[in-house]
Image (tube, rainbow, N blue to C red):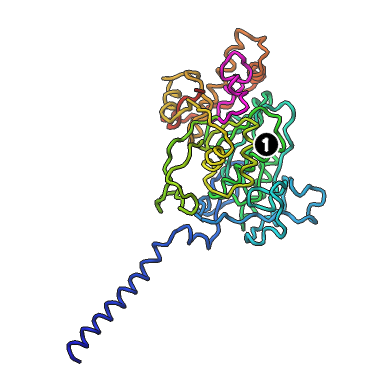
Amino acid sequence: MDKRSVCLLLICINVCLVIWLVSVQQSPMLDPEIMADFSGTGASGLSSTPQPPQSSANSGLPRRSRSRPNQIQPPSPSSSSTNDSSQVVSNSFDSNHLLATPPAMASQTPAPPGSSMHLMDLPNFVYLMDQPACDKNVRVLIFVHSAVRNVEKRRIIRETWADRKYIDQTPLRVIFLVGGVGENSERWQQFLGRENHQHGDLIQGNFEDAYRNMTYKHVMALKWFSEKCAHAQLLVKVDDDVFMNTPQLVKYLATPSLPEHSLLQDPELMLCRSVHHSRVKRSYRSKWRVTYKEYPHRYYPEYCPGMAIVYAPDVVRRLYEAAQKAQYFWVDDVLITGILAEETGSRITPLKYYLEQKDVRQLLSGEADLEDPPFLFTNHAIRPDESMAIWQMALDRIQRPLLTHPASSSPSASAAASLASKSPPAVPSANISEAQTSSSTGFS
């Protein structure tokens, strides 16, 4: 073989090697969300009474997917002939109806946009679990956005700021929102049925309870309020890892002399601690990564973080109607309180105070007072012992005026009078000085 032939052979080998290396290296560089399109998505959370089903270590972690996870197949008409198809309510729901179907099979005849069976681009939406409409005495509906497996978080809320011994004597109502359990999770559905039978406070939509389905849950809240609680003065959307100061809200509602009383009557109210000039995350490593196809701009509009938002009924109605026509975007707070708020002319009212982590530490160590300044919400990720301790402080504050003014007739005082004769939730023996969560919340 001459020198020229050897050179050509070496060149061919090098070219083949380069082509092979490129083809091998491209696979890891593919968008992980695209790769996830070929798999399902999970749910989240875990624990408490009644004992939840056992699950694998990774079952609480939602898998990332650009396409929305499957819609849960609603029960067939023959299996629930006595129930309205748009309100499938059952505390002992037949788990055989909860098998997820591919999106193409979720509906045979798409419902029109105005239909009660329509939720954004889900054509056959139903409530797998539902609750009675609000009675005339409800002035504030509080929707707690939870996940199927967040049993312990719901338990803590029911034992603290949503304790029925207190809430039932106020104009507030608290309901937890969850999605469907997904494929091969029938035991979780049975557990939710028992939980709902015990507490009567769960609403469940027939979309899979997954990270990228949070927009469905948010719009479901707007839908339920618009259809079953529209006479109420306020809708509050709060996450299940936030402490809400319900006695403070009752005080605002019952005290006309407070400026917050008038503010809460504003028909244009969308109250939160807003986020300004938030840059869109493009990194593949980010949990919040958004592709250019999903959202083409560099920055989001001003929006409300989803952990705590207070809506007036007119704003709920406008945002719900806009959401029904909107293209789906999985970052729910950006879509609803940012993009759709701009489209509908809804403006954010700034919430000046809420308890940050350092403020919770100061409050529980005695360095700060519960009402200095007053707050409505803590930041997210508050610990159970912190919630219990703050709730005990709130109860003590409610009951203290009764020693000198037992004849008070305000809603908060009457609730406190009843509570005074009952044992309040015990504060855990955990070291309160190690508290890690929250800051002071009030209005601007």
Query: Residue 108: x, y in percent?
Result: 71, 60
Secondary structure state at the residue bearing disc 1:
helix
Q: Which residue is mark 1?
A: 225
Q: Is residue 155 left or right of residue 73?
A: left
Query: Residue 46: x, y in percent?
Result: 55, 45
Tag count = 1
Identity of the residue drawn at 48% across and 19% down: 373
Query: Residue 266: x, y in percent?
Result: 61, 24
Query: In this orientation, which residue lies closer to the viewer: 419 or 231?
Result: 231
Q: Which residues are magenta?
A: 243-270
Q: Residue furthest left?
A: 3
Label 1 Cα crowd, 10 Å radius (few <14 / some 14-19 / many 20+): many
Q: Is residue 287 left or right of residue 99?
A: left
Q: Amino acid at mark 1?
A: Phe
Where, by quadrant of the figure, is residue 67 drawn?
bottom right
Quarter of the picture holding the N terminus:
bottom left
Identity of the residue drawn at 72% across and 32% down: 134
In the picture shown, does residue 356 fall above or below 50? Answer: above
